[in-house]
Image (tube, rainbow, N blue to C red):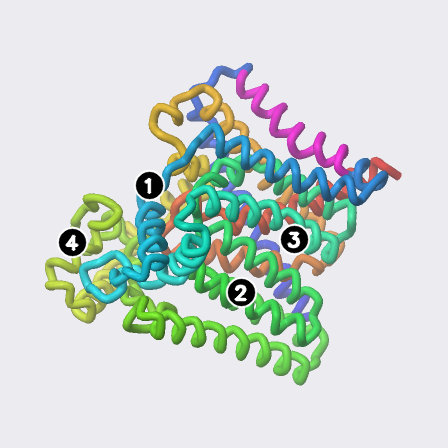
């Protein structure tokens, strides 16, 4: 009874978010200046990329699994390579700073983590990913091409993990559909030429979820290790950590096996924490940072950005560039006294939270933009002149309609689960609900939807795959 009630509440919660996102996306598309006939073409291309390719993929899979997986990797990698040749992306903004840090780490000259006015002291949680870049720059003699190849490998390998997870959750036909949706999803392709911790983070998240779904102790430990490494690469692994704990709790309520819950949760938490502490110690011992990277020096900054209607500054400052951001100028006022700034941030947040009259509309506008506007990751991949080219604009438009289709298919999938009391996707729903809830209160950009895309793809493949399976009978 309890699990049924909680399951329905969770699904209603997801339905509200998805419906909100659909409305926001449709409104965003109405502002698209493209003529109607072009919008029809964009819709047709989006449908072909999802439905048409999915049907072909299922038929191919039934004839030859080896050929299916070969083509899946070739198409996924080929699309990224083709985009990379077109974009010829050079690191910009925060990505350029991370690349420089990686090069400094490779050369043994990285000191930015020790100076309070520097980027990597302010955002010390970025040091983990910088160290990852530094390792590969060290073994490749600072080759940008090698780093871009690693991005493509991570993205292509993620297609296989999407297949594996979906096969476990639903079946082989649905798994084929999920993998194809992932490989054909344009926002992912447009971001593939960027040296970006989201690709590594998503790959590690998928690995973690894949092993945890096996629900056996050794695999749970392995899944915890990957999710811990995900958090080191990008500090959203803690969101998946919370989702998994809630998943274990729901399983315990359903089965009433408290010992199994304590064992699974204990092993999961222990491995996660050991890896986090171990990586902290490694970063300190390698002289990349004076303190733990898992403990941010600015613990409230993301909330100031997420709940403040002032561009992330508690004093109304504006950023000069990616190094001298609004928080840099805020800290400068306090002579880079982090304790004083953090105390002021708490007071600022208290004021914002209690100002219900402005907070409510602000959260609405923020989430409407976050869930509805086109993914702007491509702006980091292209120059301004490239962004203005017809092919770039058309790809962004098709990608936005793909995203809308993803939302509709995911919504239909959740509705189907209402009718059948299907709880196979409960971890996916918990993870999606956790991500969306966290983004209500922290900084958002449309490119931060990346992990949510993967979860939506699993839900969407359940409904589209079910339709294809029914039509093939």
Give how far across and how far down residue 83 sits, in percent.
51, 32
Magenta stretch mostly in which secondary structure?
helix
Residue 215 as seen in the image, left or right of residue 361: right
Distance between the Cα atoms at labels 1 and 4?
21 Å
Q: Is residue 246 above or below residue 407?
A: below
Residue at which label 4 appears? 329
Q: Is residue 389 magenta?
A: no
Which label was assigned to residue 9? none
- Kindly identify the residue that appears in the image at 36 percent across and 47 percent down: 95
Q: Is residue 439 left or right of residue 1?
A: left
N-terminal of the pair, mark 3 or mark 2, is 3
Q: Quadrant of residue 88?
A: top left
Q: Earlier in the sequence, mark 4 or mark 3?
A: 3
User: Which circle, 4 or 3, is nearer the viewer?
Assistant: 3
Q: Is residue 41 magenta?
A: yes
Q: In the image as oriented, which residue stretches furthest toward the bottom?
A: 259
Segment colored magenta: 38-57
Q: Residue tagged by mark 3?
A: 161
Please tell me which of labels 2 and 1 falls first in the chain. 1
Secondary element under disc 1, as helix, strand or loop, is loop
Identify the mark nearer the N-term, 4 or 2. 2
- Quadrant of the frame with the C terminus: top right
SS label for mark 4: helix
User: Distance between the Cα atoms at labels 3 and 2?
Assistant: 14 Å
Give the mark nearer the N terminus: 1 vs 4.
1
x 83%, y 41%: residue: 64
Residue 340, quarter of picture: bottom left
Q: Mark 2 and mark 1: span between their CA atoms?
A: 28 Å
Residue 271 to residue 466: above or below: below
Report which residue position mark 1 lands on. Answer: 92
The residue at which mark 2 appears reads as: 227
């Amino acid at each position: 009874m309890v699990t049924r009630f909680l399951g329905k509440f969770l699904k209603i919660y997801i339905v509200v978010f998805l419906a909100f996102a659909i409305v926001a996306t449709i409104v965003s598309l109405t502002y698209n200046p493209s003529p109607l006939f072009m919008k029809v073409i964009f819709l047709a291309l989006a449908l072909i990329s999802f439905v048409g390719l999915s049907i072909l993929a299922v038929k191919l899979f039934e004839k030859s699994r080896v050929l299916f997986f070969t083509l899946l990797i070739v198409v996924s990698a080929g699309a990224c390579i083709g985009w990379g040749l077109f974009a010829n992306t050079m690191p910009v903004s925060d990505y350029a700073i991370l690349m420089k840090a990686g090069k400094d780490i490779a050369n043994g000259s990285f000191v930015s983590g020790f100076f309070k006015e520097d980027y990597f002291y302010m955002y010390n949680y970025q040091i983990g990913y910088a160290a990852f870049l530094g390792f590969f720059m060290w073994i490749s003699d600072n080759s940008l091409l090698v780093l871009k190849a690693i991005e493509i490998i991570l993205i292509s390998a993620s297609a296989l993990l999407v297949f594996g997870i979906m096969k476990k959750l639903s079946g082989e036909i649905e798994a084929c559909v999920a993998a194809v949706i992932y490989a054909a999803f344009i926002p992912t392709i447009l971001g593939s030429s960027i040296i970006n911790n989201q690709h590594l983070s998503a790959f590690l998240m998928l690995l973690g979820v894949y092993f945890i779904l096996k629900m056996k102790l050794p695999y749970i430990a392995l899944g915890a290790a990957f999710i811990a490494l995900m958090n080191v690469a990008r500090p959203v692994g803690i969101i998946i950590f919370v989702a998994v704990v809630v998943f274990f709790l729901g399983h315990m309520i359903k089965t009433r096996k408290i010992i199994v819950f304590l064992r699974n949760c204990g092993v999961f938490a222990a491995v996660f924490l050991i890896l986090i502490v171990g990586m902290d110690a490694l970063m300190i011992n390698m002289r990349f940072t004076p303190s733990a990277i898992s403990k941010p020096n600015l613990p409230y900054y993301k909330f100031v950005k997420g709940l403040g209607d002032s561009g992330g500054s508690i004093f109304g400052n504006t950023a000069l560039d990616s190094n001298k951001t609004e928080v840099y100028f805020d800290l400068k006022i306090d002579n880079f006294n982090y304790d004083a700034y953090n105390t002021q941030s708490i007071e600022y947040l208290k004021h914002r939270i209690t100002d219900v009259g402005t907070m409510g509309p602000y959260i609405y506008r923020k989430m409407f933009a976050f869930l509805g506007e086109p993914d702007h990751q491509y702006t980091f991949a292209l120059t301004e002149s490239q962004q203005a080219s017809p092919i770039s604009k058309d790809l962004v438009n098709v990608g936005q309609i793909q995203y809308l289709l993803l939302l509709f298919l995911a919504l239909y999938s959740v509705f189907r689960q209402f009718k059948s009391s299907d709880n196979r996707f409960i971890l996916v729903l918990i993870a999606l609900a956790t991500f969306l809830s966290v983004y209500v209160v922290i900084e958002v950009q449309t490119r931060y939807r990346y992990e949510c895309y993967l979860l939506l793809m699993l839900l969407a493949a359940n409904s589209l795959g079910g339709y294809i399976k029914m039509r093939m009978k």
